[in-house]
Amino acid sequence: MNESGDRPRDARGRFVRPESGEAARELQNPYSARLAFLPIHARDRRWAVVVAHRRAGKTVACLNELIAQAAGCPLENGRYAYIAPQLNQAKDVAWQYLLDFTEFMGPERRTSASELWVELPNNGARIRLYGADNAERMRGIYLDGVVLDEFGDWEPGVWTRVVRPLLTDREGFAIITGTPKGRNGFWRI
Ligand SMILES: Nc1ncnc2c1ncn2[C@@H]1O[C@H](COP(=O)(O)OP(=O)(O)OP(=O)(O)O)[C@@H](O)[C@H]1O
Ligand SMILES: [Mg+2]
């Protein structure tokens, strides 16, 4: 084989090391799972409950699980949701993470800051942020997967009455997460 064969060159024809190229830097997924959350990414169950201490990395791990599932969604128009007790809270804690952890997918990824969704470039699947405080606005949609964050602070009944039925059409999954805080709805589940 020709020694200079397939080695990459820069715009002026000089050889460059592949790892120093822009493309190599751009397309790195920045997420690396913490040990405690590996089982969440490896699970094969439809329902999961994740109990962890404050700052353990629940929100980051669950959002990245949504991103990975959305990117691999085999159905058209995949729809995924991250739901915090309040919409403002979802925006404060999850919007920047959602942008940061999907940026590596490139400029074809679409985003809406007003509706708080990100659409993945490979299959058009969307991940959207909601609040359990105005979960009524979710009526009429379907979901392929959902994360219910800080579940101990959710109004009782929103999961069973509003969110659970949205998963029926496409047999979507749910991950319920939070930190223990007395005998609340999270303790019961
Ligand atoms: N896999 C990871 N790699 C590097 N940093 C991480 C990872 N997961 C979480 N972090 C960092 O740890 C901190 C806590 O993460 P996160 O907000 O996900 O935790 P949490 O368990 O949801 O916290 P809280 O109990 O406050 O809701 C953040 O600064 C976040 O950026
Ligand atoms: Mg959190």
Image (spheres, helix red, strand yellow):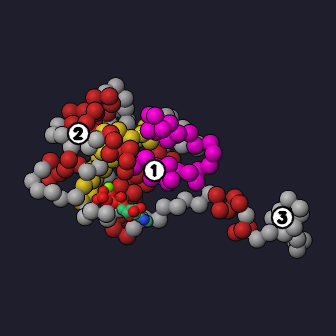
CB under 8 Å between callouts 2 and 1? Answer: no
x 52%, y 61%: residue: 30
**Among numbered discs 2 and 1, the one appearing first in the sequence:** 1
Can I make out residue 168 in this image? no
> Of helix, strand and loop, which one carries label 1?
helix
Q: Which residue is mark 2?
A: 159
- Badge 3 is on which residue? 9
The quarter of the picture where residue 10 lies is bottom right
Residue 9 drawn in magenta: no
**Which span is picked out in magenta?**
94-119
- Say whether disc 3 or disc 2 marks the residue closer to the N-terminus: 3
The residue singled out by tag 1 in the image is 96
Q: Quadrant of the N terminus?
A: bottom right
Say which amino acid is labelled 1: Gln
Residue 97 among those drawn in magenta: yes
Q: Please state the quadrant of the image where ligand 1 appears.
A: bottom left
SS assignment at label 3: loop
